[in-house]
Amino acid sequence: MHPATRRWSLRFSALAILSVAACSAPAEESTENGADDLSLSNLVKLARGTIDRTVVDPANPWAQKKLAIGEENRLPNEAAEFATFAKLVNRIQANSQAELKAKAPFRAFHAKPHACVRGTATLDNRALPASARVGLFATNASYPTWARFSGGVSTPQPDKKLDIHGLALKFVGVPGARILTQPGDDTATTQDFLFTDQSVAPASDARHMMAFAEASLGVADNNSILGKFENLAAVGAFLTRDENVRIVDFLVNRALPKTRSTGSLLGDTFYSGAPMALGLEAGDVNTAKAKGAFKLIAKTGVLRNGVCSAMPTSPNTKDDAFLHNDLVKRFGAETVCIDLSIQIQQDPNREVLEDVSVEWRNAAISVGRITFESRKLGEVAADAEQATCDAFSFFPWHTIADHRPLGNAMRARRVAMPSSAGYRDATTPEPTATAPTGGR
Ligand code: HEM
């Protein structure tokens, strides 16, 4: 998720507008631009929290075609559309920087780091079927691994405010032919995976995620109170469209309860949300059909008697940085761990590649664990290891070809994320196994 949004607090004011607008709007009426207002049946589903996450979103143009296992659906005009996202993320960054009068730009999303540390991943493929022992899962090796815990929105904010939480992993020293997107990729050995603590993304496709980001941005862009109100109403109007019902469901029925209940990131489950390949058929590695697909799940905790045990904690809402401070306490006292498992695509109509609002419900299979030795964590900006890690670009396209990111959300990220990283001058080189601390 983020993804895709700016000021969730403003968004919630927008939800107030949404409820008024939705109640006064005649059901199924068409707006001037042709979009349907929130239908009565969708309103009822929203209120009950019963939006069906097993079927594709009718508003997602990438997901309306039946596909085979590992098959993607590229729309003819998608490259031009994704190029506009690269510009939008820079507008978001300029805005956040101006708003906080910050010296340097933030990440366009996931701006606030809660901690950024190095540990060791030990992979174990024994539970996997032979067909899934591909790429990273082909051998049972250990890798230095960096992990960045973050808040999801584009501006650092108090931890009690509506948000999703992010986790980014960077495995170092992974062998294999690579996807080349940026200078230095030919010599890199990193394999990145990005997660949020929601099993679905806020919207079903990149278009709706970025449209939400843009609608929200209008509020922050405007300096006058009246202007802000007008734009807030525009966000409300955006959310009351039937095609955005999954975004509203995400905010109200998923993100809000999760924000209110999460006091520690070490009692949480993180989901890659978007899928990756399990090997590619012959051809150009950028476009060849994937032989299989998977999503990765990361469960965080502390190691006790060989078990990675979740440490659920209530939020300490009096502390603006309770998530960082909880990590400082836990890392200072115990070995922190992350258990990794994968869901393998079995039925392309259930484990959908082109709609990230559909929940994959098939069983997850264990593939290993990351451990982080106990250590004293300082503030991210003042701690050398954490500052190095925070300055990396975590990017799903830092990858071996066997795990090429799949689906429109991933293809859009290939364009949008480097634009954000470039704008904030994230030039820390990819770390190597022999120089694992990276650094400039
Ligand atoms: C399921 C889908 C998604 C997930 C799980 C996800 C997760 C994340 C995470 C965890 C980060 C923080 C990485 C870090 O710690 O450095 C991040 C950053 C970011 N994401 Fe997403 N994201 C998703 C979809 C998208 C989409 C569709 C876009 C845009 C088209 C996007 C654009 C970005 C950008 C621009 C950044 C900042 C990159 C930087 O400055 O290095 N994301 N995302």
Image: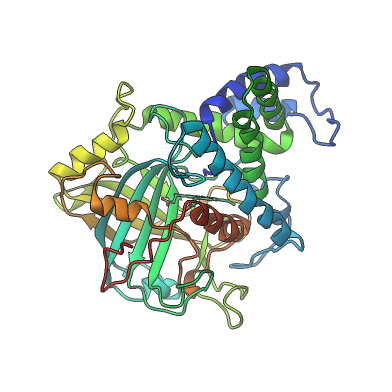
Residue 122 on image: x %, y %: 26, 65
Residue in view at x 50 percent, y 64 percent: 397
Colouring convention used in this rendered image of the protein: rainbow
Residue 78 on image: x %, y %: 71, 59
Q: Is residue 318 visible?
A: yes
Residue in view at x 30 percent, y 40 percent: 267
Residue 395 on image: x %, y %: 47, 59
Residue 149 on image: x %, y %: 35, 46
Q: Nearer the viewer, residue 416 or 289?
A: 416
Answer left or right for 198 relative to 268: right
**Quadrant assignment, res 415:** bottom right
Answer left or right for 296 relative to 66: left
Q: How many marks?
A: 0
**Quadrant assignment, res 123:** bottom left
For residue 151, above or below residue 402: above
Q: Nearer the viewer, residue 70 or 109?
A: 109
